[in-house]
């Protein structure tokens, strides 16, 4: 990744009523596609749907709660002062983007015109609607290239109210919170935090001492792209795994780490006949570097728990963790059958490419890979991350905190009521436009290829778990990823050598939160 910060680019959107009318005409194809109900934002229980199928944007009379238009389609609108309440104001959002990455560039806020891409068009229409509804000029600034947020941080530190909100990756969100650069959102008092367009699991699981400095929700879908999943090649399952019905296995709650490991360890084919396994051959599984911590979370291992004061407590050297690591070692470490794209040699150069070119039965990856696999000629399916055992209560997934975009508010803002109203507008209208475009149209409608995978995606979206120990940049993620990359099983010794530093990092965060909350 590059280290240079992108120069800030501003796309001013001075919207007038005639532009909105034009947008409504352009909306018709997306509105038809988005009329199907979609799963809730993780943690929300409300029904989500797109705008009306006839292209009309008829809002409910009551603001702040979901209503229905004449077609029965749900429409979300936050409570606002007399509209348009912010004429003459400017709202600048600092969007996280990494132009050095194939995947983690901004698609949640930047859209200069309608171009036929469902997500681009949804963002464009959302932004235009928000600007017209609020009366404010909406500006999208770019930065954070290669994970460098110095442009944003320096501006906040100077006290300049240049950016009213921003996206940071999750690790960076905690770092900037402890440096007192961010607004505590519960105390801000101007965001409708309990609204269905904000992720309620995030609020409860990522809080410390009742404080939240970042949110996920329908304001953007980048974080959803990072949810952990398993993809499988249907032809290779037929050819090498006796055509086992993996969807039935999952439905019967038999999709466990051990079950998956037995399948993976039965597939190793020297396709080129050179006497050694290389990425030109066939493996049972390929995977990416953070599979170890992600698979542990999805198996129900808790890196941190919370006490009665909403403080994280770290103590995961227990039988559950040891057993799960032993099972994952059986799944991940047989290099004749399983290869990582980040582990020590032997490995594959690109696990996505290996899977898409029929060199692996399974790919343990993230949701964005489903969209990337659309050109793949061979049919594929999608499964949840495996259970610890059949007694585990739920299938789980989690985010990738290194890239998941987290909405934050700089503490340099001068008009919190304006900022809160604009964020609720962006997120609520994102629930009407952006989430359906991503989930219904792009993911469900165009990427996956069977109803069972669609049902699996519904299950995944509704089962997100945010573990503070993993996402808060205290070193747990790095320790567990390093252990997986080195194919090590000596967890007890690694834990003992690292736990003091991990707890120290965590306690520094708790102490800082206590000071900020006081």
Image: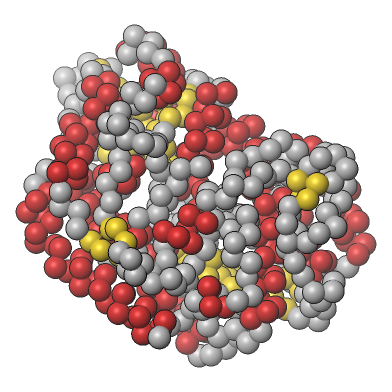
Can the viewer see residue 2? Answer: no
Model colouring? secondary structure
Q: Is residue 309 above or below residue 58?
A: below
The quadrant holding residue 337 is top left
Name the image quarter holding the C terminus: bottom left
Side of 442 where 499 appears, left or right: left
Residue farthest left in this picture? 493
Name the image quarter holding the N terminus: bottom left
Q: Is residue 452 above or below residue 457?
A: above
Q: Residue at point 45% right, 47% down?
A: 464
The quadrant holding residue 479 is bottom left
Side of 470 where 367 appears, left or right: right
Can the viewer see residue 244? Answer: yes
Q: Residue at point 78% right, 61% down?
A: 63
Residue farthest front in this picture? 308
The quadrant holding residue 113 is bottom right
Image coords of residue 61 (percent x, y):
85, 57
Image coords of residue 184 (percent x, y):
49, 76
Q: Residue at point 38% right, 72% down?
A: 209
């Amino acid at each position: 990744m590059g280290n240079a910060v992108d120069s800030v680019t501003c796309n001013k959107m001075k919207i007038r009523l005639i532009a909105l009318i034009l947008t409504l005409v352009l909306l018709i194809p997306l509105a038809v596609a988005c009329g199907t109900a979609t799963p809730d934002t993780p943690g929300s229980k409300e029904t989500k749907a797109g705008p009306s199928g006839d292209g009309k944007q008829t809002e409910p009379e009551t603001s702040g709660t979901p209503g229905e238009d004449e077609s029965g389609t749900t429409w979300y609108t936050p409570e606002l002062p007399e509209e348009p309440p912010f004429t003459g104001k400017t709202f600048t959002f600092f969007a996280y983007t990494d132009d050095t990455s194939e995947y983690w560039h901004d698609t949640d806020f930047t859209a200069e015109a309608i171009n036929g891409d469902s997500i681009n068009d949804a963002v464009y229409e959302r932004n235009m609607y928000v600007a017209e509804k609020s009366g404010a000029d909406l500006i999208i600034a770019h930065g954070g290239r290669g994970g460098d947020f110095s442009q944003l941080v320096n501006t906040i530190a100077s006290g300049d109210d240049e950016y009213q909100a921003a996206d940071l990756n999750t690790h960076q969100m905690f770092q900037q919170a402890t440096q007192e650069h961010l607004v505590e959102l519960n105390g801000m008092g101007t965001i409708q935090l309990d609204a269905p367009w904000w992720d309620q699991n995030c609020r409860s699981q990522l809080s410390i001492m009742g404080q939240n400095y970042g949110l996920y929700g329908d304001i953007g879908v980048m974080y959803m792209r990072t949810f952990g999943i398993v993809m499988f090649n249907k032809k290779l399952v037929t050819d090498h795994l006796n055509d086992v019905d993996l969807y039935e296995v999952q439905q019967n709650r038999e999709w466990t780490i051990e079950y998956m490991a037995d399948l993976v360890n039965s597939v190793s084919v020297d396709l080129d006949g050179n006497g050694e396994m290389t990425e030109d051959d066939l493996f049972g599984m390929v995977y990416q570097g953070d599979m170890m911590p992600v698979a542990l979370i999805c198996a129900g291992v808790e890196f941190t728990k919370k006490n009665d004061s909403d403080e994280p407590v770290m103590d995961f050297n227990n039988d559950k963790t040891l057993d799960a690591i032993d099972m994952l070692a059986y799944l991940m470490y047989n290099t004749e059958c399983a290869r990582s794209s980040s582990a020590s040699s032997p490995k594959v150069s690109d696990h996505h490419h290996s899977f898409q070119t029929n060199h692996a039965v399974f790919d343990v990856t993230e949701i964005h890979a489903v969209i990337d696999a659309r050109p793949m000629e061979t049919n594929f399916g999608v499964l949840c991350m495996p259970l610890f055992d059949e007694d585990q209560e739920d299938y789980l997934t989690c985010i990738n905190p290194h890239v998941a975009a987290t909405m934050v508010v700089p503490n340099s803002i001068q008009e919190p009521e304006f900022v809160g109203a604009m964020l609720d507008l962006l997120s609520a209208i994102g629930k009407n436009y952006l989430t359906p475009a991503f989930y219904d149209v792009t993911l469900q409608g165009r990427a996956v290829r069977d109803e069972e995978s669609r049902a699996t995606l519904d299950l995944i979206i509704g089962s997100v778990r945010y573990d503070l120990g993993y996402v808060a940049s205290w070193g747990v993620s790095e320790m567990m990823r390093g252990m997986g990359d080195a194919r090590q099983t000596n967890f007890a010794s690694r834990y003992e050598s690292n736990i003091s530093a991990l707890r120290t990092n965590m306690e520094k965060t708790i102490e800082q939160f206590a000071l900020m909350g006081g």
